Image: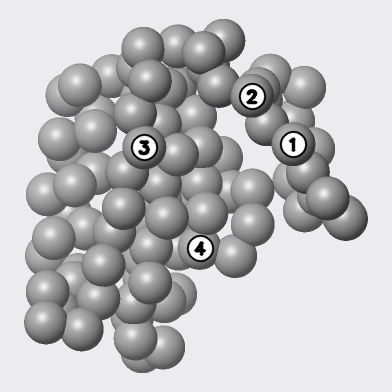
Amino acid sequence: MYIILVYDVKQQRVGRMLKLCRRYLHWIQNSVFEGEISEVKLAELLSKARALLDEEEDSVILFKSRTQQWLEKQVLGRERSRLDNIL
């Protein structure tokens, strides 16, 4: 499946969340990641993210699609990560 993951966490947890997400997905902008991921790897990522979060203060939002071909990406301004295989 193809996902876009966005997180908003307190500053003291940002570094750990960034490192975690980079292990599974492609970083495209501050707190935004995208990429192909299996159900098993996604469950693993979410389990580890849940352990880092304070659910009263932080959030992780996922957008899922079967494949990236069903999404259209438009960038205004400078794109931080230029990967040929992204949307």
Look at 20% across and 84% down and name the residue there.
57
Return the residue nearer the eye: 68 or 37: 68
Q: Give the answer, above or below, for where 66 lies relative to 20.
A: above
Query: Which SS class for mark 2?
Result: loop
Look at 29% across and 59% down and name the residue there.
60
Residue to which mark 2 is pinned: 72
Q: CA distance from mark 3 to mark 2?
A: 13 Å
Marked residue nearer the N-terminal end (1 or 4): 4
Residue to which mark 1 is pinned: 74
Marked residue nearer the N-terminal end (3 or 1): 3
Under mark 3, the amino acid is Phe
Question: Is there a contact, CB below 8 Å, between mark 4 and mark 3?
Answer: no
Under mark 2, the amino acid is Glu
Q: CA distance from mark 2 to mark 1?
A: 7 Å
In the picture, measured across the screen, residue 15 lies left or right of residue 39, that is: right
Under mark 1, the amino acid is Gln
Query: Which SS class for mark 1?
Result: loop
Under mark 4, the amino acid is Ser
